[in-house]
Image: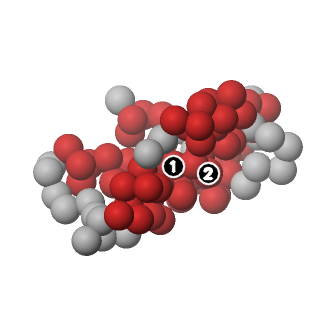
């Protein structure tokens, strides 16, 4: 469940999970608060999609947030997304 994974980054887990362990999975200097905010926003976006809500409003900022999180997780995945994603072109062509 996405909620479980995003919950790992909340303030309550900073000293028990982030500081001793989880920060090592991310590039040096990764801001846990920024990551937590991005993941929470992506969880909300995912829920909007799941409930068939209109997602075109603000979709470019959501795309950028997804790329930000991918960049933190894997440079290989980021390269794949940049090479194969058509989302930017689709958003640019929308009415």
Q: Position of residue 53 (x, y in %)?
A: 16, 58
Name the residue beneath numbered marker 1. Answer: 66
* Closer to the camera in the image, 71 or 80: 80
Locate residue 18: give its quadrant.
top right
Report the disc number at residue 68: 2
* Closer to the camera in the image, 36 or 17: 36
Residue 61 is left or right of residue 26, and the answer is left
Seen at 19% across and 62% down, the residue is: 54
In this picture, is 3 found above or below 48?
above
Q: Position of residue 92 (x, y in %)?
A: 41, 65
Q: Label 1, label 2: how many angstroms apart (C-alpha)?
A: 5 Å
- Asked if the residue under mark 2 is in contact with the one under mark 1, i.e. CB atoms within 8 Å, the reply is yes
Instruction: Identify the residue at the far left of this view.
Output: 52
Instruction: Identify the residue at the far right of this view.
Output: 28
Instruction: Tell me the quadrant of the picture where the C terminus can be found.
Output: bottom left
The reply to whether residue 33 is visible in this rendering is yes
Q: Position of residue 5 (x, y in %)?
A: 48, 34
Residue 49 is left or right of residue 93, and the answer is left
The reply to whether residue 13 is visible in this rendering is no
Seen at 35% across and 64% down, the residue is: 93
């Amino acid at each position: 469940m996405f909620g479980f994974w995003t919950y790992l980054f909340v303030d309550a887990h900073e000293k028990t999970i982030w500081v001793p362990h989880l920060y090592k999975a991310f590039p040096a200097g990764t801001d846990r608060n920024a990551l937590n905010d991005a993941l929470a926003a992506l969880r909300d976006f995912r829920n909007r999609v799941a409930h068939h809500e209109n997602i075109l409003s603000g979709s470019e900022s959501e795309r950028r947030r997804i790329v930000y999180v991918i960049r933190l997780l894997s440079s290989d995945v980021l390269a794949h997304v940049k090479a194969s994603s058509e989302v930017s072109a689709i958003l640019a062509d929308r009415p």
